[in-house]
Image (cartoon, helix red, strand yellow):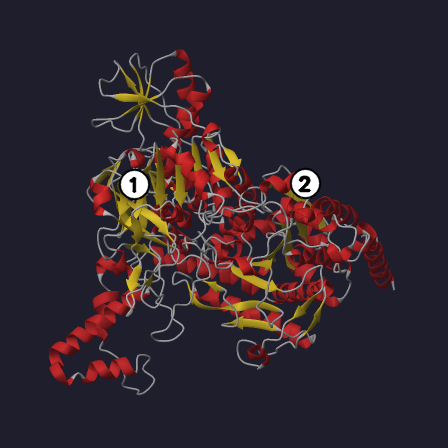
Amino acid sequence: MFKRLIFILVCVSVHVSRAQVPTPKEHFGFAIGDDYHLANYTQTEAYFKKVAQAVPNLVKLQVIGKTEEGRDQIMMIVTSADNHKKLDRYKEISTKMARAEGLSEEQARAMAAEGKAIVWIDGGIHSTEMVATHQLIETLYQVTTRTDAETKRILDNVVILFTHINPDGQELVANWYMREKDPTKRKMETIPRLYHKYIGHDNNRDYFMLNMKESQNVGRQLFVEWIPQIMYNHHQRGPAGSVLAGPPYRDPFNYVFDPMMVTGIDALGAAMYNRLNAEKKPGFTRLNGSSFSTWYNGGLRTTTHFHNMIGLLTEIIGGPTPEEVPLVPSRLIPNNNTPNPVTPQKWHFKQSIDYSVSLNFAVLDYAARNSDHLLYNIYSMGKNSIERGSSDYWTPYPKRIEAINTAYQADQAKTRGARGGGVAAAAADPMGWGSRSAGMPLKFYESVMRDPLLRDPRGYIIPANQADFATATKFVNALIRTGIGVEKATADFTVAGKKYPAGSFIVKTAQAFRPHIIDMFEPQNYPNDFQYPGGPPIRPYDAAGWTLAYQMGVTFDRMLEGFDGPFQRLPYGELQTISAQVAAGSGGYVLSTKMNDAFLAVNDLQKAGVEVFRITQGSEMGNFYVPASAKAKATLDQVAQSAGLRVTGLSKKPTQAMEKVKPLRVALWDTYGGSMPSGWVRWLMEQYHFPCNVVYSKEIDAGNLKNKYDVIVFVTRAIPVYRGADNDPYAAFRTETKEEEIPSEFHATMGRITANQSIAPLKAFLEAGGKVVTIGSSTNLAYHLGLPVRSALSELTATGEERELPSGKYYVPGSILRVSVDSSAKASWGLPGQADVYFDNSPVFHLSSEAVAKGQLTPLAWFPNNKPLRSGWAWGEAYLQDGVAAFEAKVGQGKLYAFGPEITFRAQSHGTFKWLFNQLY
């Protein structure tokens, strides 16, 4: 009787406590999912705090950092009261199991049984995707107030990390939508700027670099502090004719993954869509039903895949303004992609919220029922990675399989001659389905997949004596932020006969997150992926290749054998700083242009009123010279200590010719609604202390530009395609934002660059001595100006007309390519003779030989051979040979700089930043 009374009292206590949690309607004034209503972040943050105060036994509110606009970024830790008492222990178990270091099988099994599953559920990364933001609010409310058996099981067996990804964006978008008193006039499509201060939608492309504050906050929790077994990333929107797209995803998945991660996604996907089907919620599509894959690294979800986490993404339709599920007949036939199609109908916000909450509970219930398996499986994946990094291992890339086929076919041609039966049979039955005896002798496998030279590395050495060690250290910090274990040499050492200095960094692959390490150092090998043989390519979801070490221009050595030395293991998550001493320089100081941070120092020197010069000839050409002074020494000391800038002190002034570096008035193009590439460059300029103004098309069209600016920078997608008289063939289909619908404070930012209004003022600016820097598709300006250049990626039709190469012949989605560089050209000072560039079907040119001979055009970078691919996918790459990737052109007294590759891509491509920086003086 006494025990029963205690049980009743506990139940009543829990019920009363949970009854104190305010409903969303009580707090916001509307229910989550009500049409035409959105909550902003100020309101959401206040609600989170109310919930945490109402049920402190279930909810702990943690501020994980500040946003770029200075708001608190919140993570809500939700679990049972008993689990909260042991939260530090469960956190320790999660990280130990994920890293899989120093655990015996018995210890791992015991910890899996003792621990609790850690599940990350986020929302709000893309602020116009308001279902994703608001499901977070509703799920928090339900999981803290429901008293059913399922919810109790979840709270008892799972630690939930509810995390808001983009507070600034929610505040902007919700306020913009709700500003209209008439609900039917509310819309999100016309927001005046990016919904992240700098990068908008690209905030979901920052998770191996972690440049932004929000990304750093999230990365710390995901990769260092908690390392959850499951993370669920909510997005919009689903493919037309469906309600949502989700796991499992289409091929290709990345070849460095542990297979248990891939099958883990399959298992969670089954739990998710089975629950929807049981609840009569149709319209879930998967696999080839959508474009989403697991190839790419860098997204919030996808980066977790390289850390052995089961990363989930759903993309759902809906929003505060009711809409229609459109009729797409092909979606109505049940198949393996869409087993339970949805019928065309009116769709409301609440339906999307209900779907999302159901999906969250499906994931949480799976975790609650399989907590020990999830913990043990992430341990097993980590252990597998450590074993692969400790022994000889060959990743089965497509290029390796192609090499096997090539070797076999060459052997067959040699031994069978004209008969060719083996080659034909293998080609006709590549999967070996037609016969039990189909296949190739084992020797062909061993000739490639046991070739010692093709082994995966055991580790990498990043020497401290490379030309730009400060940038290499930034690369190392990107690894550290993503939970990678790094070692540092405490003394000089020798490996494989090569000497390395103390301070060098070492990254060994015998660690749990080996997939991420391999992915940051090694080239991606994207498969040839076409809609059908001979047909057009299937576009990758994002980039095909991104190898960060290549993009950043880092010098490193690959070690195929195990190695050791005087190495100190750095604590997980501890960022590295390097500092340097500025030697006395009675004759002044020299800064090598090979160092990106030299430009930061020059900008600080100029701000302090210190003169800076640039050496224009000899072995020091391009380097900066700073005359000796107390102010110069103090400024250089500060930069050397904070950024590790190496400064050479001189006993006497250099005798080489030099010119004074003049600070220029720099303008960066942007547009109403915001340009992500422009936002990245704006952030980049701030990091290197370049003063910069933002310029919009109306100001450009008004002319008189040279009186205000010396340099104008146009990122990709600023300058329209050149079409002769018909500049914009899509104008009739374009929906322009109307000024009368927008507050007057934003009118100056509206409009776009056009051939009729913008080109003449830009030409006048150039002719008057201005400089224009164009990147990516904005190199179209060269055609608008009538310069003697043409596309290198075209062909003549049977009728003699010139057309772009069709994608069946040539296609290079986002990848890393190698170019030759004229490093003696002023525009290229500081770059090496060869550089890796980020290339995304970028412009390539042929220059008039006569114009080059006259000095009107100067090639800066070009493709010297027919195999420039370094990482990614380049179909028909031979077409690039001898094409010019970058050039400068004289236009009157000024210069146009045209860079086809994305030289500032997502602030990752440090190796080519100098192509922008050099033009800003």
Q: Which mark is residue 465?
A: none
Q: Could you tell whether 153 is left or right of 761 in the image?
A: right
The image shows residue 366 at horizontal and vertical percentages of: 62, 67
Residue 831 visible somewhere in the drawing: yes
Residue 920 point in image, percent of width and height: 40, 32
Specify the quadrant of the image occupied by residue 773: top left
In the drawing, what numbered circle is on residue 565? Answer: 1
- Camera-side residue of 779 and 689: 779
- 506 or 112: which is nearer to us? 506
Q: Give the left or right position of residue 162, taking residue 578 as reference.
A: right
Helix, strand or loop for disc 2: helix
Residue 112 vs residue 490, the one in the foreground: 490
Q: Secondary structure at mark 1?
A: loop
Quadrant of the drawing holding the C terminus: top left
Please name the amino acid that badge 1 sits on.
Gly
Q: Position of residue 206 (x, y in %)?
A: 49, 48
Please name the residue that numbered disc 2 is placed on. Answer: 744
Please, which residue is most extreme toward the front here?
A: 725
Q: Residues within 10 Å of mark 2 (few under 14, many from 20)?
A: few
Residue at image position (31%, 47%) is 836
Above or below — where is 339 with respect to 634?
Answer: below
